[in-house]
Image: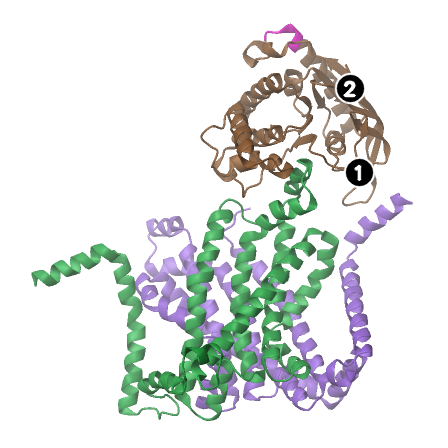
Chain colours: A brown, B green, C purple
Amino acid sequence: MPAKLVVTDLTHHYPDEYTGESVHALEKINLEVNEGELVTVVGPSGCGKSTLLNILAGLLPYREGNASMDGVKIQGPSSERGVVFQEQAILPWRSVAKNIGHGLELKGVPRGEREKRVSEFIKLVGLVGFEDKFPHELSGGMKQRCAVARTLCADPAVMLMDEPFAAVDAQTRITLQEELNRIAIATKKTILFITHSVDEAAFLGDRCFVFTARPGRLREIVNIDIPREKRIWADMNNDPRFIEARDKIMRLVREEVLVSNA
Amino acid sequence: MNILQSISIGVQRRFGRQRLRKIFLGSIPFAVIIFAWFMNGYMGWFPPVFIPPIGEVWASFFLLQEDCPGIGAIVALDQRCLMSTHILSSLSRVILAAVIGLPAGIALGIVAGMSRPISKFLEPIGIFANSISGIAWIPLAIVWFGVGWKTTLFILLNTIFWLLFFNSMMCVRTVSRVYEQSVLTMGGSRWAVIRDVFLPGAMPSIITGIRLALGFGWRALIAAEMVGGDSGLGFMIFSSAAEFRMEEVFLGVIIISLIFLATDRYLLAPLEKWTILRWGLIWKPT
Amino acid sequence: MRNNLNRFRAFWRHFPAAGAINLALIILCILLIWELISSTIDNPSRYLPSPILVALSSVDMIYKGLLPSYFGDTLIRLITGSSIGLALGIPFGLIIGINRTSADIFYPVMNFFQSVSGIAIFPIVVIWWGNSDTTVLVVILYTSFFPIAFTVLSGVREVPMQYIHAARTMGATRFQVIRDVLLPGSMPHIATGSRLSIGFAWRAVIAGEMLAGREGLGWMIFTAQDADKTSEVILGMVMIGVSWIVLDHYLLRPLEADTIERWGLVQR
């Protein structure tokens, strides 16, 4: 199977906001994400996970190394790569339906077809009945559902998710993770999912990339061979494959956190 | 008595007790002022050159309009229709300045606000321009444009433009960058970012800015017409005062405030409320 | 190389005098453009004298003692007028804020008189008091009274009910509630309103001096225009702008911010 996203020897520095010291965020990253795969990225905070995502999204220019999609170098944002941001990024002045249809609107899809697609995705993320609500009327979990639906609806080839569930409460997070799993089954999208939660990384990922402390390097790839359909939180805590993968990721991340604190 | 009672109950039901109470209490001072003004006319506490009789003020409106040949002359701002000509020439300047100044100020403000270095550079200029804008420009405007409509228009435009430019620039700066990024990653162009992010994001504050700018602009226009104009309400009250025609001065002042009150209360305030309801509740710039 | 540049940029961002130097550069830029325009137009001394000429005229005016005296006159008028305006407006706002009935009585009439701008009543005031200092003071008083009264009114209204209830349950009298809850609770609004009022008063001073012909900065630019001394007009405008910025940014805004921080209901 051909790799969808390919990153080779990607190194990135950026100037610190306050000291101006050059921060070495990424060091010679090599990774591939296959078509239809859900890959999670974990690592200690400040390891350059978000930098990697911003580069892949095309929001951050880079000089050293290469990042490409379908063999084409990434140079700027494109609707082929949708992003779900960590912060609340759905537009507050648009209703849920209009937010979800925004990507199609930008592409110039006619209204009739747009509405059909939007209602499909509203059903998929379980926001039926909230179409005309505005973001401030939604709970944190619903806002993120809306954000996911917005990205999905623009029908990108790849979805990049930057700790999308970090700001919601624990109960909701579990539901959202199961829903994302369901969506991944239904849409077969290629997804790169960044998180700092080990549980989340092990639960969602087909593979999990563990990053080292700064400068971020790819330390290890953990495979999680659980069929998507079997991934339900109620069963997971008894599943030896999940426990093994989670403990392994946990151990690796803890080592890296200790390094970064030292 | 029963009829009176039922009428009173009916009125109270129709308008609401609290509102009636408010209207009644609020009209007391106006009634007192108008009564005192009437009494002054009869008792002669102050001579008419200080406070003209209320009847004369009312009559002067028609006196000024007396020689007017007809509607056509009113529209053509004929000098014989003094009253309507003064009112319309002030109003048309406000409308002209609003048509030019508002879009220009908003557009340039948004463009400047989108880039942090540019807006940082323009911030001190905006602060400075706003702190001398308005009245202090009148003498220089007279030097440049002479006494007349150009000077008054310039003063008005200058006041409106800088207020709106600065206001829109600062508003755009507060719109979160994540919104811009999210539109860009959905394949939005630069123009789409302006249309879907910066413009709606800054909209509630821009409307507030428009209301503010027009209020300041109206005051500046009156001052400019007094000093450097040859028509308009400001010119009217100033020239009438010079000839001690107090009834015309009072009339002019009352018309000036009624026009301001009407536009502010019935046009701009509802517009502001509507945008804040539409956008502001949803998102307030912080 | 790039690294050094970045380091320099960050250093510059946190260098204390960076703001001042930036500002100086901007001013220099404007002066250059101004000079350029004035050197290309016909008859610059009438339409747009070069900045150097303006600076020279300021030296001349300072030497003759005119500029300081005008400046002082304007400032004294501003201080007297706005302090009387505040002294009347704050208690008035408090009273109508506390008592619903008085608010219902006075709110509409205040609203009406506020929309009669101070400049518009000028011709009337001139006839009543002539071209005197009283005229200017009355106009300043008039323009500064309403903004402060309205902000204090809304400040008193916005003091949360539970503070008043808390004081009442502890046995506070009506007067004690006013003294201990309503007055401190509306302090931030009083500060904001004062700044607003002084801003209005400043515009009124300039306009008042122009129209009533009392010596001061407004009068200076008005008579200079009559005498065809455009450089003095521009000098006066710059003085007006700069002194307001200094007053606003270095005195009024910090005072307002301090008051809000000290008395603000915002808990941090």
- Residue C173, given in percent of the width and then of the height, sits at 33, 58
Marks 1 and 2, Cα distance to the nearest angstrom?
22 Å
Between disc 1 and disc 2, the foreground one is: 2
- Left or right: B8, with C129 as reference point: left
Label 2 crowd (10 A; few <14 / some 14-19 / many >=20):
some
Helix, strand or loop at label 1? It is: loop
Q: Which residue is mark 2?
A: A3
Disc on the earlier residue, 1 or 2: 2
Q: Which residues are magenta?
A: A238-242
Does the segment drawn in magenta span residue C191?
no
Q: Please state which of residues A260 and B220 is positioned toward the viewer in this rendering.
A: B220
Residue at 61% in and 82% down = C218
Question: Residue at label 1?
Answer: A61
Chain letter of the residue beneath label 2 in the structure image: A
Residue B255: in sight, yes or no?
yes
Give, as a three-letter code, the residue at label 2.
Ala
As drawn, which residue projects farthest toward the left? Answer: B1
Q: Which secondary structure type mostly characterizes the magenta part of the structure?
A: helix
